[in-house]
Amino acid sequence: MHINGKEIAVEQQGEGDAVVMVHGLGGTSNSWYPQVGPLARFYRVVRLDLEGSGRSPAAGTLSIASFAADVIGVMDALEIPTAHLCGHSMGTIVCQHIAADHGERVKSLALFGPLAEPPEAARQAIRDRAGVAREGGMAPIADTLVEVATSAETKAHQPAAAAFVREILMRQDAEGYARTCEALAAATSANLAAIGCPALLVTGDEDGVSPPPAVKALGARIKNARLLVLTGCGHWTPIEKPAQVNASLLNFYGNI
């Protein structure tokens, strides 16, 4: 799909109210594949590869603002006036900015492994990861993130989920991933006080990127937000705990 002068890969399934799903750093539209079947029974599920990720090549400098503009552009192209926004990791920042700046377009927020912006201590590490991608490719990054970003339970009892995380990372274009790292490192918080829609914040008890206390603090800054912590789960929430994520989404949307 041609959006804002670039090619953005988009998939959609189902009918009904739209649920637009935005992946995080290193993810693609397939990060949400475990959610498609259950949600598409009741909703129009729209998933995109952000510019620089998956099948959407990096055409220029990337930023949270450009990602948000592309999500809005996809909604416009598909004639979706309002949608439930569902984000993972970096995608939660994108969704928060859209909800704050274009509240009339957003029915709800479901945020998995959420953060408002990277902690200052993490910004240089993310920039350093961009350099690793450019110099050494994606394999060392994939191995490191599988180890540190998935739970002990996932690695021991769901090796296929760990393998999926490794594969999705290794398949990324190194330059696109590096530019996405730089976009995330430069991210700043949305105006959280401007978000008025219902919000669900979900994280894992072993999520080192979005630990429960930090997510609880984030939820306290968003009106109408509630927190769910999944046990035995790391940062790749939709992949590590698909059944619980699917149930949480269906319950959340069913009560709006």
Image: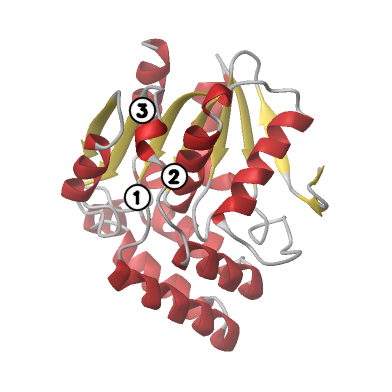
Q: Residue beneath label 1, please?
A: 115
Q: How many marks?
A: 3
- The residue type indicated by label 3 comes to Ala
Element at badge 2? helix
Q: In the picture shown, does residue 184 fall above or below 22?
A: below
Please report whichever mark, 2 or 3, sits nearer to the chain's N-terminal start.
2
> Can residue 28 be seen at all in this image of the molecule?
no
Give the percent coordinates (x, y) of residue 42.
Answer: 55, 14
- Labelled disc at residue 132: none
Residue at point 34%, 40% (across, down): 241
Q: In the picture shown, does residue 195 fall above or below 17?
A: below
Q: In the picture shown, does residue 150 fall above or below 213?
A: below
Give the percent coordinates (x, y) of residue 126.
Answer: 42, 73
How far separated are the C-alphas under marks 3 and 1? 13 Å
Question: Neighbour class for label 2 at 10 Å: few (<14), some, many (≥20)?
Answer: many
| Residue in front for this viewpoint, 219 or 88 | 219
Q: Residue beneath label 2, please?
A: 92
Q: Seen in the image, is 189 located left or right of residue 79?
A: left
Q: Quadrant of residue 239?
A: top left
Question: Neighbour class for label 3 at 10 Å: few (<14), some, many (≥20)?
Answer: many
Residue at point 54%, 76% (across, down): 138
Instruction: Quarter of the image for the C terminus: give it.
Output: top left
> Can residue 256 be seen at all in this image of the molecule?
yes
Instruction: Quarter of the image for the N terminus: give it.
Output: top right
Give the percent coordinates (x, y) of residue 244.
Answer: 32, 31
Residue at point 30%, 23% (across, down): 224
Residue at the limit of the structure toward the bottom, as seen here = 135
Q: Are marks 1 and 2 in contact (CB under 8 Å)?
A: yes
Element at badge 1? loop
Q: Seen in the image, is 237 located left or right of residue 164?
A: left
Q: Residue beneath label 3, please?
A: 199
- The residue type indicated by label 2 comes to Thr
